[in-house]
Amino acid sequence: MLQRIQTVYLLIAFIASGVLPFLFPLWIDETGADYYFLNNVAFIALFGGSTTLSAVSILMYKNRKNQFVMGRLNIILNLILLGLFVYKSLSLSGETASESGVSEKGIGLILPIVSIVFISLANRAIKKDEELVKSVDRLR
């Protein structure tokens, strides 16, 4: 059933990894230009993989075990992406040379964290559904 709460959580994770990276820059480079994920092949592959896994997990609502495993794989993928972001952000300076003092790190750096949180919530709901089905099967 698509009207379960984990579908909403997975849809939010899909939006966080598939739509929002196009809108929010990851950081501002030395020239003052916005740096989006499209400038790096590894970021494209990891965001694309996370988006694909979220979409496939939404469509696998009939097989809760596989849906749970795909959620775990998606969390691992987002952790790798977050690790790459941390590595890259440590090499950036903290402030720009402009007089406004705006930070160079963009809101796009926290998108994997948002995805991880909502995929974890979806996995918790999937596990709860699986336990409910098992308990009903024992009563029969």
Image (tube, rainbow, N blue to C red):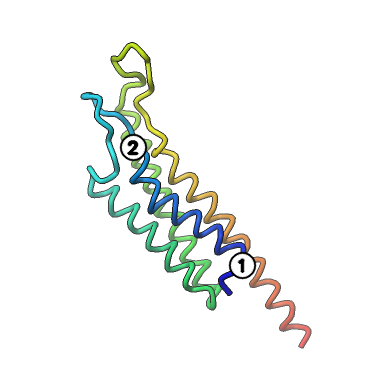
Extreme residue toward the top, this view: 99
Please provide percent x and percent y for residue 56. 42, 68
- Quarter of the image with the N terminus is bottom right
Quarter holding residue 8 = bottom right
How many other residues sit within 10 Å of disc 2, few (<14), some (14-19) or many (≥20)?
many
Give the total number of marks visible in the rendering: 2
Q: Is residue 134 left or right of residue 37?
A: right
Q: Residue at x 58, y 63 (%)?
A: 6
Disc 2 element: loop
CB contact under 8 Å: marks 2 and 1: no
Picture layout, residue 8 above or below residue 36: below
Outermost residue to the front:
23
User: Does residue 57 sit above or below 20 in this rendering?
Assistant: below
Which amino acid type corresponds to the residue marked 1 in the rendered image? Arg
The correct choice, above or below, for 9 with respect to 134 in the image is: above
Element marked by disc 1 = loop
Q: Which residue is mark 2?
A: 25
Q: Position of residue 88 (x, y in %)?
A: 31, 35
| Figure quadrant of residue 105 | top left
CA–CA distance in space, label 2 to label 1: 32 Å
Residue 92 has which mark?
A: none
Left or right: 140 in relation to 28: right
Whether residue 139 sits left or right of residue 2 in the image: it is right
Say which amino acid is labelled 2: Pro
* Residue 4, disc: 1
Residue at x 48% of width, y 50% of height: 115
**In the rendered structure, which disc, 2 or 1, sits on the residue that comes first in sequence?**
1
Pinpoint residue 140: horizontal percent, then vertical percent.
76, 88
